[in-house]
Image: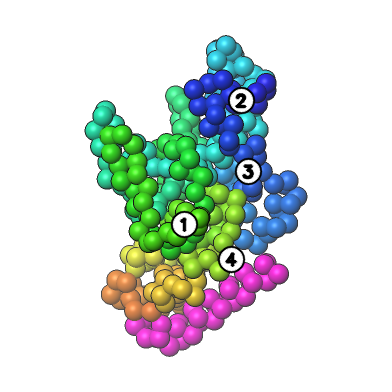
């Protein structure tokens, strides 16, 4: 197709012609629409970060290829829009490359039941790869592995809790449903226990009543907090996964056990502690039990719970 970056005369032309012309993930939205609809959610920062990395990779790689090898990379074809189209195709339709047979042998062990890749573009000194993201974070987490395309299999829609298996053989991959399927019914895949933010960012849709849905809360120790370095050190000691800037990312949902809030409470316990309470917490077991009890006393328990409630109220206010 002239200027479209998709040659129907190529070996995969028939498959590529079946692919969407555009996608519905937030990188395809108008900027004003994205800012308005995602305001107050971590997904807005995730979409911005992904777009920035995609544009950086495009700027570093594509102009050089178009200049040095215009016969393979004609500038009129390799536009940013087509770059976004190709990345979105892999994000929404790619599978873990471990499914692909290698050297006539069976491929590696199948991924977790119903696994389907998410992807981001990363540029390094020599090339750009579209690779699978190992978790459901919407930010710019570590990248590992790679993706492959599986025509027809990528057209199966997602349904939560659908039980499916993948059997890798030298001839290909067999997709099998564990549960019975009545004649004429739609066969579904299971993309994994993805919250709606991951489904929207990677696939461009959400699931009403999603049993795997969570809300991602990002909190941090205030930059000017007294004894901040000591509090950060204690957070790590107590098993709270804060980054170098003191941020903690936590998933909250009615379906998750209370244990999922323990790191969040621990961070607010440290943030609310007086110098004397910090000394007590430094001698506490690792990690200390959640409130009530097990920390620096009732005063610290009360202060940390109040701080957490205030933070949740601020988050709700941002969401309107």
Residue linked to disc 3 = 23
Earlier sequence position, callout 4 versus callout 2: 2
Left or right side of 229 for 57: right
Task: Give me the disc on residue 208.
Answer: 4
Depicted 67 relative to depicted 124: above or below: above
Real-space CA distance between mark 3 and mark 1, rounded to the nearest whole angstrom: 31 Å
Earlier sequence position, callout 4 versus callout 3: 3
Depicted 19 relative to depicted 43: above or below: above
The answer to whether residue 294 of the structure is visible from this angle is yes
Question: Quarter of the image holding residue 73?
Answer: top right
Q: Which residues are magenta?
A: 291-320
Foreground mark, 4 or 1, reads 1
Earlier sequence position, callout 2 versus callout 3: 2
Q: Secondary structure at mark 1?
A: loop
Real-space CA distance between mark 4 and mark 3, rounded to the nearest whole angstrom: 20 Å
Q: Secondary structure at mark 4?
A: loop
């Amino acid at each position: 197709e002239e200027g479209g970056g998709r040659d129907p005369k190529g070996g995969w032309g028939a498959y590529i012609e079946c692919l969407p012309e555009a996608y519905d993930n937030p990188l395809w939205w108008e900027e004003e629409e994205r800012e308005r609809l995602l305001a107050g959610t971590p997904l807005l920062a995730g979409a911005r970060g992904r777009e920035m990395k995609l544009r950086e990779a495009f700027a570093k790689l594509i102009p050089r290829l178009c200049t040095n090898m215009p016969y393979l990379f004609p500038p009129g074809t390799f536009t940013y829009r087509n770059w976004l189209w190709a990345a979105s195709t892999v994000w929404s339709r790619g599978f873990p490359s471990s499914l692909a047979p290698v050297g006539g042998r069976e491929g590696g062990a199948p991924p977790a039941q119903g696994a389907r890749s998410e992807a981001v573009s990363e540029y390094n000194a020599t090339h750009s790869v579209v690779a699978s993201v190992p978790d459901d974070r919407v930010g710019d987490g570590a990248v590992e592995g790679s993706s492959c395309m599986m025509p027809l299999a990528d057209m199966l829609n997602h349904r939560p809790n659908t039980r499916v298996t993948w059997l890798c053989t030298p001839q290909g991959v067999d997709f099998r449903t564990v549960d019975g399927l009545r004649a004429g019914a739609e066969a579904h895949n299971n993309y994994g226990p993805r919250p709606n933010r991951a489904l929207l960012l990677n696939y461009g849709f959400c699931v009403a009543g999603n049993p795997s849905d969570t809300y991602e809360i990002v909190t941090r120790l205030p930059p000017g907090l007294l004894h901040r370095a000591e509090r950060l050190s204690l957070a790590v000691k107590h098993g709270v996964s804060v980054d170098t800037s003191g941020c903690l990312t936590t998933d909250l949902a009615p379906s998750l056990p209370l244990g999922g809030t323990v790191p969040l409470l621990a961070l607010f316990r440290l943030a609310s502690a007086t110098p004397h309470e910090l000394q007590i917490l430094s001698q506490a077991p690792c990690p200390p039990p959640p409130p009530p009890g097990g920390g620096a006393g009732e005063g610290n328990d009360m202060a940390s719970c109040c701080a957490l409630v205030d933070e949740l109220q601020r988050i709700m206010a941002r969401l309107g």
